[in-house]
Each structure stands twice: as C-alpha cells, then as structure tokens.
Image (cartoon, grey):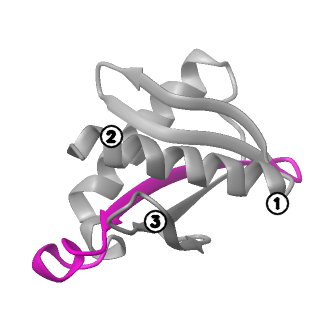
Amino acid sequence: MSRIETGKIGEEAAEKYLSEAGYLIRERNWRCRAGEVDIIAEQDGTMVVIEVRTRRSRSSAAFGSAAESVDFRKCQKIRLVTEVYLQTQKQSGRTVRFDVITVLLGADRNLIDLTHIRDAF
C-alpha cells in the first residue's frame, strides 16, 4: 500500500468519524499555493481545521507516532493555509479550532485505532 493510498484511507475514516459525530464537512483536501489542509469542518458555529495523520501498524515504531509527526513547521503551514482559506471565503473573523486525527491501520487496511485530538495546536 502506497503512502498516498494510506493517507486516503485515513482521511476517509476521519471524515466518516466526524460526520457521525455531528460535524458538517465543508472541504476536503483544500489547496492553495501555500499548501493544503485535509479537512475543514464546522461544529457548533466553530470552523474546525483537521490534520489527519495515518500510520500502518508495522511502520509506527520506525517513524514515531502519527501525532508526533505534526511538528511546529507543519502547524505553521496549516495556520497559513487556513488564513488563505478564510480570506478567500470572506470569513476572516471566524472562530477557528485546529484538531488532529490520528489513524492506525492494520496490514489488511482495517482500522485499528482513530484518535481525535481537539485543540491540538
């Protein structure tokens, strides 16, 4: 399974989880010149920008946890892309929360674990 396939499966699992939890999905893989955000959702009037990190069970130990991979540089990039999104949508005054969802997949692509970290950064 390629890195792109792994990421897509993780994002689909995260989107399903968020929808079932009552989030309204606004965008998925929103891109601009500054970069990309995985999911933009809304919950109780708050815009929620979600970074999804997916790992396969056998690769987790070698590369650290999925949550650890969201470093300072990645957080700054997500904030920048979010600012561009807010400006293009004419919503600059919106309340925004940044969450991380980590997904762990088994060898047969089955979902082993999904963890939602609210207010991650």
List x then y, in percent, for residue 79: 42, 46
Disc 1 marks a residue whose amino acid type is Ala
Which element is circle 2 on?
helix
Examine the rendered structure and indicate whether residue 67 appears above or below residue 82: below
Please report the residue visible at 72 percent of the width from the left and 54 percent of the height from the top.
18
* Mark seen at residue 5: 2
Location of residue 68 by image quarter: bottom left
Residue designated by label 1:
21
Q: How far is disc 3 from disc 2 in space, using C-alphas?
A: 13 Å
Examine the rendered structure and indicate whether residue 39 appears above or below residue 66: above
Q: Is residue 49 visible?
A: no
Q: Which comes before the other along the chain, label 3 or label 2?
A: 2
Q: How far is disc 3 from disc 1 in space, using C-alphas?
A: 16 Å
- Farthest-out residue, left: 62
| Left or right of 111 on screen, residue 71 | left
Q: Which comes before the other along the chain, label 2 or label 1?
A: 2
List x then y, in percent, for residue 64: 20, 79
Q: Is residue 49 magenta?
A: yes
Q: In this picture, which residue range is highlighted in magenta?
A: 43-65
Residue designated by label 3:
103
Examine the rendered structure and indicate whether residue 10 appears above or below residue 60: above
Q: Which comes before the other along the chain, label 3 or label 1?
A: 1
Mark nearest the camera among 3 and 2 is: 2
| Nearer the observer, 43 or 21 | 21
| Nearer the observer, 32 or 62 | 62
Q: Is residue 62 magenta?
A: yes
Location of residue 37 by image quarter: top left
Please report the residue visible at 56 percent of the width from the left and 44 percent of the height from the top.
12
| Nearer the observer, 119 or 91 | 119
